[in-house]
Image (tube, rainbow, N blue to C red):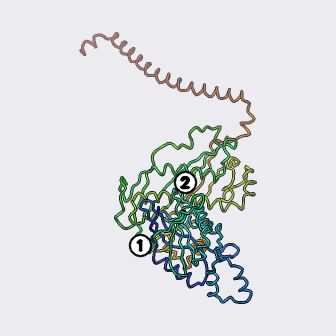
Amino acid sequence: MVKTVVGEETQLKLVEDRVFQSGISAQVGIVIGKISSSIDRGFVFDLIPTPPNDGGQPACYISESKDDNSNKKKGSAKGKSQTQLDSSSPTSSLVIDSDWVAEHARQVSRMLLGGMHVVGVYVWASEISFKNSTLKLWQTVKEVAQAAASFENGLDERLLIHISYSPRRWTCRNCSVGSTMTSNSLRPCDFKMGRVLASLQTFRCMYNFDIRLPIYRENLSKANTLTNILHNGISRHAKELKSAKDIIDGNLVVQDQPCTSDGLHEVELLLPFMKDASFEACSQKEVLGVVAYQGSACSYAYLSPREPISQAVADIKADILTSLKSRLAIISDEGEEDMDSTAEAGRDSNAEISTEKSISKLDLSLLRKSCILTFPRRVLVPWVGGAFICDYLQPSETFQVLEDNLKELMSMEAPIDVSKIIEAETEATSLKIKSFWDAVISNPSTSQSASPSKKNSQKDSTQKEASREPVKSTTFNIVIPIIVLLVAMLLGFFLFVRDPKAHSRVV
């Protein structure tokens, strides 16, 4: 249970000044940080406001009582002071679009590296509005926790930060996002500010992967879409990755020790040599083809002070899996709008399928041609305090798309310095999907016209011819030395009988 939370002072002061000068009565957003169960401590790196929804409406505002509405009709509204007066009304409460906040959290979670997570929700509101909206705030935190859950997340704790302007102060609560809200679901915790980002340790890993998955016949599996196959494959690969040996800066990690050295730490993962369990008990009658999900993933992780070095390795592994799932989610999201055309293209065996939109939701048991799918590449962008965040770009997208995404989702108004962007995943090592139809007969028309008896007779004759050839070859190889030996013996005997005196003289 987290009892102490430390926030990055530089970033949080900027957030406080920004919302205070804006004059708005309420604002909601997400909290980026880390909750460390090993040291029972929480860290807050930054607060990101949730942007307006598609209709241009804010994600949070103050509900107005009947008295407030009557005052507005009489023309008593007086700008900022009246707004704060309304929010201080005993009946005022917060109206929050929790679904939109959760969607914002889901998209931002894709842009965070290892050791960074969406750990909760913050709200800018008066004390009265906050107290009158406890249930709604808890529900929002719970939805955010579900939308931005990490790959292996066993914690049910999230943070709820309240920035009050009447009076002006910060408070933090530990939210237990269980099934129902109880009296212990919101517990106050000690909140203080300090230099958090400057004390982070950075770890990097270039991970090469090759995940091969079978495509079953339609009557044996109902999960033959590309999305389902890869999702299940990544989940299985997580078990192998968990048992990998860890090497940091050339040294094998053998014990749970803190990281004492500064600078960038290089991580290598050694996977165990084992047979791919996904192909066990599979035969040619069950499998139509193979999906090969292969490439390189650039992974980063940030270790907080006093955390053991094993936590950095765990964050690296989780970041690799999250990165693979995020690319798959991007492909799936972009293919939603083309579902109808995709299904029709898949039923046509002569259809040329080459784009990610045309096969992301396609039932691969209907596909009869090999295809290649290029996945988005991961690029790293400088964020705050020397830390990086990431985004994913399709082969046809430019850095302008990257800048637009960061501005909308991360509230980064300053232009991006292109020279500081890290592109470790080059085009040569980008992620790809390859479907191999090795089990499909190359000429179905010929095989269907042949009768079973004819096939069996051809098979038997082929086996007989194949069995005769090695016997002939072996017999021939044995006879030749025997003939040579007999000729030599006869020749020697003939010479001895013809001239026995010559033999005696030699002796």
Residue 407: x and y in percent read: 58, 75
- Residue 400: in sight, yes or no? no
- Asked whether disc 1 touches disc 2, contact meaning CB atoms under 8 Å apart, the reply is no
Classify 486 as above or below 445. above
Residue identifier under label 2: 294
Q: Is residue 114 visible?
A: yes
The residues bearing labels 1 and 2 have C-alpha atoms spaced at a distance of 35 Å
Asked whether 500 or 39 is in front, the reply is 39
Q: Residue at x 58, y 37 (%)?
A: 281
The amino acid sitting under disc 1 is Ala
SS category of the residue bearing label 2: strand
Total marks placed: 2
Residue that appears at 60% across and 52% down: 230
The image shows residue 98 at horizontal and vertical percentages of 64, 68
Could you tell me which secondary element the residue under label 1 belongs to?
A: helix
Return the mark for residue 27: none
For this rendering, which residue is in front, 337 or 44? 44
Q: Is residue 467 above or below residue 273?
A: above
Q: Quadrant of residue 432?
A: bottom right
Residues packed near mark 1 inside 10 Å, few (<14), some (14 to 19) or many (20 plus): few
Q: Amino acid at mark 2?
A: Gln
What percent of the width, then of the height, locates residue 252?
36, 54
- Choose mark 1 or mark 2, whichever is in front: 1
Q: Residues within 10 Å of mark 2 (few under 14, many from 20)?
A: some
- Picture residue at 64% right of the left edge, 26% below the top: 461
User: In the rendered view, would you say 266 is above or below 469?
Assistant: below
Classify 43 as above or below 154: below
Left or right: 105 in relation to 222: left
Give residue 198's mark: 1
N-term-proximal mark, 1 vs 2:
1
- Estimate the x, y position of residue 240 in percent, counting from the top left: 49, 49
Q: Quadrant of the C terminus?
A: top left
